[in-house]
Amino acid sequence: MTTPSQKIQLVRLAHARSGDKADWVDFGLFAWNAAGYAVLAREVTAQRVTEHFAPWLPGRVECWTLPNILAIKLVLHDALQGGGARNLRLDNLGKSMAAALLRMDINVSDHELAACLAAPRVGWWGDE
């Protein structure tokens, strides 16, 4: 029997911080909880991120999972067409690209999505 699944955007399960240096963008993608991290660790790969950014990204993507902080670190090389001050693309810096990353579609089962949304969010702010 096949488990019902759906496509959702990363923003449903995570938030991101990013920055840029020279011609690369560095992302921290943080799951809201352990259930969400399990999905991110499976779905967010260097290959998938490369495909998502294909129209803008001639370089490679590096990806590291960081389970102790429920995060994934991503580095996009050659992402800024020579650097933020050197190219003609509007709003290409890291902050804008983090928003673009959060629009990436991932696959989740209905059960996984329910578990992710039901689990409390964790973070430095403590209980909500």
Image (cartoon, helix red, strand yellow):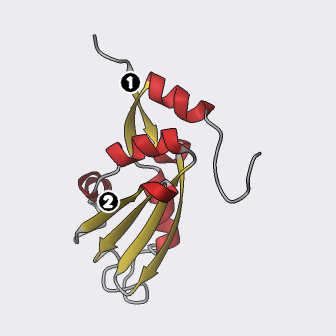
Residue 1, placed above or below residue 63: above
User: Dot 1: within a 10 Å radius of its alpha carbon, few (fewer than 14), some, or many (20 or more) residues?
Assistant: few
Under tag 2, what secondary structure?
loop
Residue 21 image offset from top left, x and y in percent: 41, 85
Answer left or right for 9 relative to 32: left
Please name the residue shown 35% across and 50% down the image. Answer: 44
Residue 41 image offset from top left, x and y in percent: 37, 48
Residue at image mark 1: 5
Determine the residue located farthest toward the right in the rendered image. 128
Residue at image mark 2: 53
Mark whose residue sits in front, 2 or 1: 1
Give the spatial CA distance, label 2 vs label 1. Answer: 24 Å
Q: Which mark is residue 91?
A: none
Q: Nearer the viewer, residue 66 or 109?
A: 66
The amino acid on which the numbered mark 2 sits, given as a three-letter code, is: Phe
Residue 84 image offset from top left, x and y in percent: 42, 84
The amino acid on which the numbered mark 1 sits, given as a three-letter code, is: Ser
Q: Nearer the viewer, residue 47 or 38?
A: 38
Which image quarter is the N terminus in? top left
Under tag 1, what secondary structure?
strand
